[in-house]
Image: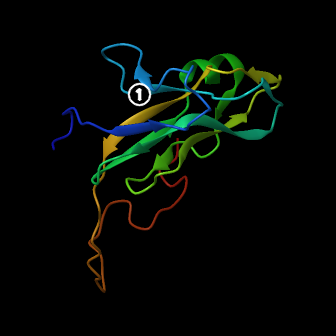
Amino acid sequence: MTAGADITISIARIPGTGEDVPLPAYATPGSSGMDLRAVVTEPVELLPGTTVMLPCGFMIAIPVGFEGQVRPRSGLAARHGVGILNAPGTIDSDYRGEVKVLLTNFGRDPFVIRRGDRIAQLVIAPVTRAVWSVSDKLGDTERGQGGFGHTGR
């Protein structure tokens, strides 16, 4: 498969949890990410500075050579200061558990999550696996060993 090509991914709902909640879907033809929705049984209040793991009610089988990237929704971040603690979260091709989102309130006000709310987005991306080539010396660059903040403003 090449980047940009459609791929088929098997998806299974968690029985008895989210049959009424839409599966991940692209909002527009140009969307890179599919909306992930909260499959909670009652509203969850996310207080400022706290994190909650929210279930999405499904499992997926991502093909080898791809990963799922769980990313924040820009609207939640801009309007409420809500994002994902480990963004982007990675769903590996060999993971078969329920997809969950680690949502964090970085804002100042409590934020309430209700059943079916769009809480994150899922991007399917190709993965390149690295093979190390051990060397005694690396090639020189203009930056060299300059670390954090080395390039200035």
Q: Nearer the viewer, residue 138 or 33?
A: 33
Residue 109: name its quadrant. Answer: top right
At 29% from the left and 66% from the top, the residue drawn is 130
In the picture as drawn, the residue positioned furthest to the top comes out as 28
Residue 72: name its quadrant. Answer: top right
Q: Is residue 72 left or right of residue 140?
A: right
Residue 127: x %, y % from top left: 30, 52
At 40% from the left and 37% from the top, the residue drawn is 11
Residue 53: x %, y % from top left: 68, 41
At 76% from the left and 27% from the top, the residue drawn is 107
Q: Is residue 36 left or right of residue 85?
A: left
Q: Residues within 10 Å of mark 1 (few under 14, many from 20)?
A: many
Up/down of 66 relative to 35, above or below: below
Counting labels gives: 1
At 62% from the left and 19% from the top, the residue drawn is 117
Classify mark 1: helix, strand or loop: loop
Up/down of 53 relative to 115, above or below: below
In the picture as drawn, the residue positioned furthest to the left comes out as 1
Q: Amino acid at mark 1?
A: Gly
In the picture as drawn, the residue positioned furthest to the front comes out as 16
> In the picture, which quadrant includes the N terminus?
top left
Up/down of 57 relative to 26, above or below: below
- Residue carrying label 1: 33
Q: How is the image coloured?
A: rainbow
Residue 14: x %, y % from top left: 55, 38
